Structures are given as structure tokens and as C-alpha cells.
């Protein structure tokens, strides 16, 4: 039987007793987090690597967010946090809006530019996994225009020696789903790399990002 311990003292006691302990994800120390409150408007955090796009911090309702402008219409992204192999989880909040029949897409990734990206594709009413720029698998998802959406992606070693990639998407302000929304498997290892966020403002409206978090996967 595996027991969960939420304090170092309890964990140490468990080890003395020979009990296999499982550290809860909520107790894991973040490898990286950023809510943009310490970044000046009009700038991006200095530790970000912007691959493309005019990202900048804006103030919205007294809260700072990172914004990608609604033009030009292309796919843009940046990398954040330390380079990591498998065994990590990245999450964040994303905001976009449609314009007529035009929709944005946005996502979060692990293991560098060529790694797996969890993407919300509103025009398809789906959430998708891409490896680099290649689509891998999709699952149904009802996106709400003009509202914040939370995304989380996790990459772990599998029992067969490959990797398991899992993702979930849910409306901000609601409980995080217990089950993962989408899942993929990689037969081999994934290269170490930084986490990333991505946006395609195809609706011509800005995409906003907030509360980026990178933690060890439990």
C-alpha cells in the first residue's frame, strides 16, 4: 500500500518504517513559475526565449498577463523554464476570442520546439497533441470564446521504456478534471528541452497567457 505524506517529517518517518511513500503533486517544489507581476508592461521576462512573435506584458483589470497581438496571422511561440527530460508537468492559463467564424489556437509544450504540444483547436472543437508541427492525436473539447482556459501537459517514462504524454484542458475557475483529456505514447526517449507556449491569432484578436508553472511529475 502506498501512503501520501504532505510534510518532510512525515515522509522521513515513513522511510524509517519502511513504508513506500508517494509525494503529492501539490507538495512538489516548482521548477519554474511566472505570473508576470514582476515584469514591466511592454516587456517579456528576461529568461524567456522568444522564437517568434511580438509578445509583451500587458495590464488587464489590475492583473499582468503576457499578450500576443492579433496580427500578423501566423504561429508564434516562446520557451520558458529550465531544460528538462521526462518526468515533468507544465501548465498555464490561456485566453482567446473568436471573430465571426475565425478562431485562434493556443497551446503549451514540453521537451523543446520538437517536443509534444497540447493545443486547443476551437475550429475543430478539439484538443490535440502535436509532435513538433505534426498532428498526433485529438480528443473532443468545447472551448468557450472570451474566457480563460487552463491547460496541463505531463510527460513520464512508461513501463515499456518509452514515454507517456498526457494532457488536460478545462475552464478556468472550475475544478481540475481528475482524468486526463488526451493521451499519446512515444516508443523511445524524448530529448531534454524547455517548456513552451504557443499561439496562432487566426481570429485577428490577441491571445493572452498567465500563471505558467513547471513542476516535477508525481
Image (spheres, grey):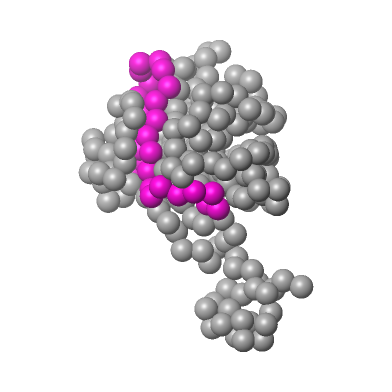
Image quadrant occupied by the C terminus? bottom right
Q: Residue at x 57, y 29 (%)?
A: 130
**Can residue 147 be seen by looking at this rendering?**
no
Q: Residue at x 65, y 24 (%)?
A: 125
Residue 115 vertical position relative to residue 38 in the rendered view, above or below = above
Q: Residue at x 67, y 82 (%)?
A: 18
**Which percent across, then down, holds residue 53?**
33, 25
Residue 11 vertical position relative to residue 73 in the rendered view, above or below = below
Residue 133 vertical position relative to residue 50 in the rendered view, above or below = above
Q: Choose between 66 and 187: the one closer to the eye.
A: 187
Q: Is residue 66 magenta?
A: yes
Q: Residue furthest top?
A: 101
**Which percent across, then down, holds residue 14?**
63, 82
Q: Residue at x 29, y 45 (%)?
A: 47
Q: Which residues are magenta?
A: 63-88
The part of the image, by quadrant, that contains residue 206 is top left
The part of the image, by quadrant, that contains residue 201 is top left
How many tags in the picture? 0
- Residue 37 vs residue 102: left or right? left
Q: Is residue 218 magenta?
A: no
Classified by dominant secondary structure, the portion drawn in magenta counts as strand
**Can residue 115 be seen by looking at this rendering?**
yes
Q: Choose between 15 and 90: the one closer to the eye.
A: 15
**Which percent across, then down, holds residue 116?**
54, 35
**Which percent across, then down, holds residue 95?**
47, 34
Amino acid at each position: 500500500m502506498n501512503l501520501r505524506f504532505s510534510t518532510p517529517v512525515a515522509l522521513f518517518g515513513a522511510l524509517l518504517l519502511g513504508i513506500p511513500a508517494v509525494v503529492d503533486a501539490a507538495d512538489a517544489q516548482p521548477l519554474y513559475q511566472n505570473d508576470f507581476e514582476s515584469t514591466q508592461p511592454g516587456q517579456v521576462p528576461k529568461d524567456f526565449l522568444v522564437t517568434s512573435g511580438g509578445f509583451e506584458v500587458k495590464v488587464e483589470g489590475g492583473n499582468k498577463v503576457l499578450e500576443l497581438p492579433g496580427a500578423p496571422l501566423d504561429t508564434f511561440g516562446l520557451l520558458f523554464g529550465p531544460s528538462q527530460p521526462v518526468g515533468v508537468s507544465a501548465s498555464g492559463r490561456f485566453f482567446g476570442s473568436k471573430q465571426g467564424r475565425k478562431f485562434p489556437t493556443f497551446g503549451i509544450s514540453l521537451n523543446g520546439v520538437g517536443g509534444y504540444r497540447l493545443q486547443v483547436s476551437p475550429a475543430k472543437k478539439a484538443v490535440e497533441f502535436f509532435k513538433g508541427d505534426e498532428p498526433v492525436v485529438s480528443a473532443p473539447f468545447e472551448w468557450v470564446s472570451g474566457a480563460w482556459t487552463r491547460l496541463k501537459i505531463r510527460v513520464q517514462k512508461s513501463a515499456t521504456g518509452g514515454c507517456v504524454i498526457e494532457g488536460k484542458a478545462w475552464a478556468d475557475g472550475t475544478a481540475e478534471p481528475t482524468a486526463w483529456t488526451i493521451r499519446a505514447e512515444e516508443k523511445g526517449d524524448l530529448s531534454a528541452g524547455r517548456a513552451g507556449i504557443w499561439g496562432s491569432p487566426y481570429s485577428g484578436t490577441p491571445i493572452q497567457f498567465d500563471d505558467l508553472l513547471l513542476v516535477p511529475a508525481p
